[in-house]
Image (cartoon, rainbow, N blue to C red):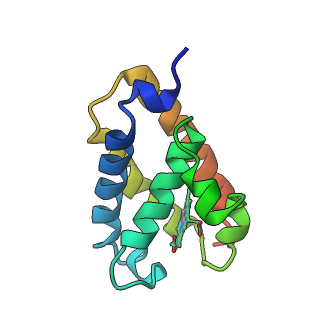
């Protein structure tokens, strides 16, 4: 059985997905101010490495950043329902733009939704 990472086409898939996602973040009035860097390259690289590792690809995230502990790493950002929804919208557009098997897309999307729910750390 090949990994999800291999089935979707490896590095190129994650690089395209993340670059689409950040092109939406770059113009989003809620999300953009949350990402302090003048360019989003560093953030894009971290998300790409994380997703590649999660889906069975190279473990560069672990080597560069250590254990993910994503909830903890998001604790410093004000993630309420509006921020969650903006993030999900940007990711939905990115995922919808990917040419991929529909079952793999469902699998990816279920994980994304579950993970995004778990990142909410502020009441409305
Ligand atoms: C629910 C809404 C979310 C918001 C508003 C949000 C926002 C942010 C922000 C502002 C950063 C800092 C950017 C950076 O310097 O890397 C960040 C980092 C990160 N986010 Fe999110 N995020 C959300 C959900 C998610 C989800 C669902 C995932 C995973 C599936 C994720 C994965 C990551 C990763 C891997 C990093 C880099 C962590 C590190 O190594 O420092 N985020 N996020």
> Looking at the picture, how far across and down is residue 35, in whole percent?
45, 79
Query: In the picture, which quadrant includes the N terminus?
Result: top right
> Looking at the picture, how far across and down is residue 55, in whole percent?
55, 37
Which quarter of the figure has residue 63? bottom right
> Looking at the picture, how far across and down is residue 60, in whole percent?
55, 53
Q: Quadrant of ligand 1?
A: bottom right
Q: Up-down: is 37 above or below 97?
A: below
Can residue 93 be seen here? Answer: no
Residue at point 35% right, 68% down?
25
Can residue 107 be seen here? Answer: yes
Left or right for 70, reference 24: right
Q: How many badges with numbers are in the image?
A: 0
> Looking at the picture, how far across and down is residue 40, in whole percent?
36, 73
- Residue nearest the viewer, comparing 87 with 41: 41
Left or right for 89, reference 124: left
Which quarter of the figure has residue 27? bottom left
- Residue nearest the viewer, comparing 98 with 16: 16
Residue situated furthest top in the rendering: 1
Q: Up-down: is 20 above or below 14?
A: below
Which quarter of the figure has residue 61? bottom right
Residue at point 31% right, 57% down?
19
Residue at point 63% right, 72% down?
124
Residue at point 50% right, 28% down?
4
């Amino acid at each position: 059985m090949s990994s999800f990472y291999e089935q979707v086409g490896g590095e190129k898939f994650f690089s395209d997905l993340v670059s689409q996602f950040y092109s939406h973040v770059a113009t989003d009035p809620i999300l953009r101010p949350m990402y302090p860097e003048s360019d989003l390259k560093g953030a894009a690289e971290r998300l790409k490495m994380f997703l590649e590792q999660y889906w069975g690809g190279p473990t560069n995230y672990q080597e560069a950043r250590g254990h993910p502990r994503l909830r903890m790493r998001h604790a410093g950002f004000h993630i309420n329902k509006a921020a969650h929804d903006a993030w999900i919208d940007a990711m939905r557009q990115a995922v919808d733009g990917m040419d991929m098997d529909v079952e793999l897309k469902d699998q990816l999307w279920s994980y994304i939704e579950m993970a995004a729910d778990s990142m909410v750390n502020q009441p409305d």
